[in-house]
Image (spheres, rainbow, N blue to C red):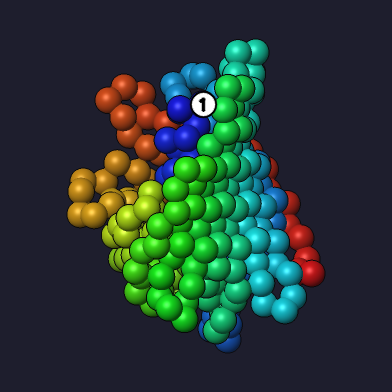
Amino acid sequence: MRLARQLIALIVAGFLLLTAPSTATQQTPYLKPFTAEYSLRRGALVFARVRVTLSLVPPGSYRYRAQTSPTGLTALFRSDKITEISEGIIEELRPIPLSYHYRHDKSDNLRQVDLQFDWQALRVINRTESSRWTMRISPGTQDKFGHQLNLMLALAEGQRDIRYEVADGGLKKDYRFKFHKEESISTPAGEFHTLKMNRSKDGKPSQASLWLAPAANYLPVKVERREQDDPFLMELKSIQWSEPG
């Protein structure tokens, strides 16, 4: 599932829904629970599916989860599953990460990564199967999956050039999202008018793009990672809303 890992590291698996302002009297967007299904493909081959959920647990906590598993012919040869979970609290309508978990179940071994955010000491504790270390962080640092929640909220508020410090792979990395253009696209879930955002890391040229639909509360309906050959694509298949609690 190397293909899935590369795309999941992008965004995945994670994808959220927001309730964004629909009238001039609504000033602040807020998170709304959801379940979304995505397909992962390269060229004409759909090789995996991604199920993403956002749960809000009173008082003021969230759990953001993505699971990727092989599908179609790929499932005949691979049984890998990748799970990412970001958990934290919501203060002043902004998600603040407390933990991040990554688990890759493979037929021959298991890979796990766990991060714990210690905001009082301004550090992240990183754990893998064989190591443990700490890293200094700044206020506002995000995990590599849950930062998407803050990204969508920022877009709903009208921001178009957004930057986060992200704890990624045991290092602090600079994620930047820049507005490229408005574009109408077709996905398995239907037609959407979108904002296309390009994402770069540490000032390097962008290799990833996200298409976010304002009419669908800034849900990412398509994600692309460019490689030398065909790009990896994640596309929305379906979305279901839930009530908090």
Residue 16 visible in this rendered orientation of the protein: no
Q: 152 or 112, which lies in front?
A: 112
Amino acid tagged 1: Met
Q: In screen coordinates, is 27 left or right of 75?
A: left
Q: Which residue is drawn at 34% across and 69% down?
A: 136
Asked if 102 appears above or below 230 in the picture, the reply is below
Q: 56 or 81, which lies in front?
A: 81
In x, y percent, where is residue 39?
Answer: 58, 33
In x, y percent, where is residue 71?
Answer: 64, 23
Corner quadrant of residue 50: top right
**Which quadrant is the C terminus positioned in?**
bottom right
How packed mark 1 is, by other alpha carbons closer than 10 Å (few <14, some 14-19, many 20 or more), is some
Q: 170 or 36, which lies in front?
A: 170
Q: 64 or 198, which lies in front?
A: 64
Q: Which residue is drawn at 31% across and 29% down?
A: 227
In x, y percent, where is residue 4?
Answer: 50, 32
Asked if 225 appears above or below 74 in the picture, the reply is below
Tell me the SS state at disc 1. Answer: loop
Residue named by callout 1: 1
Asked if 44 appears above or below 30 in the picture, the reply is above
Q: In screen coordinates, is 79 left or right of 148?
A: right
Q: In screen coordinates, is 243 left or right of 34?
A: right
In x, y percent, where is residue 91?
Answer: 56, 81
Residue 127 visible in this rendered orientation of the protein: yes
